Amino acid sequence: MQIKTITVNKTEKNKEGVKIDVVVPSSDVEIETLSFLMAGYIRDAAANGKFKVDLPEQYRLTYQAEGSFLLTTEPGVSAAKSGGNPFYTPPKPVAVVAIQRFGKRYDLAYAAINQEAFKTQKAAAPAAPKAPAKKKASPKK
């Protein structure tokens, strides 16, 4: 594993963002180990009020890039709890999580993913154009 400085929270007002040091795994074994350890740590932090994201009952962590992990719901779990929908439900993103270093201390850096933004995008998407109805040809006499 290595420590890498990344920039987060870039906005129009703060174009440079904030630089933080994060732990970056360098092999698949390190990715799997960090995912395993972070899952339990996140569950404990949520129970203690230190992880302020609505945590689903079952979730998974998937490594993305540059030390960030995507916390998502388990596929199909939310559908099973909402009326027994038999169809597959893809995982929904919940938060982006990383291990941040402060000198010799480490802690979670995380940001919730706004689910309302996904609903707005779907609602704002234009509907497919409907083909005009074909006129029936009148029978020839």
Image: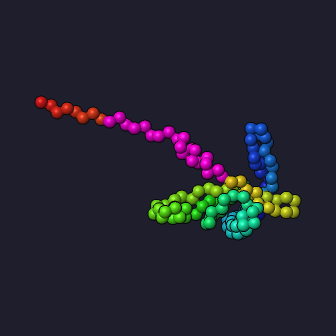
Write the residue at 54% across / 45% down: 122
Q: How many marks?
A: 0
Magenta region includes residue 84: no
Write the residue at 75% across / 66% down: 48
Q: Quadrant of the C terminus?
A: top left
Work out whether residue 125 can be spotted: yes
* Magenta span of residues: 113-133
Quadrant in the rendering for residue 66: bottom right
Task: Pick whichever, 7 or 56, lies toward us.
Answer: 56
Work out whether residue 34 can be spotted: no
Write the residue at 75% across / 63% down: 49
- Where 34 falls versus 129 (above or below)? below
Check the image and name the residue furthest to the left.
141
Q: Is residue 95 left or right of residue 88?
A: right
Quadrant in the rendering for residue 62: bottom right
Give how far across and how far down residue 3 sits, in percent. Answer: 80, 58
Give how far across and how far down residue 33 sits, in percent. Answer: 70, 69
Quadrant in the rendering for residue 73: bottom right
Magenta region includes residue 125: yes
Write the residue at 64% across / 50% down: 114
Give how far across and how far down residue 24 sits, in percent. Answer: 75, 59
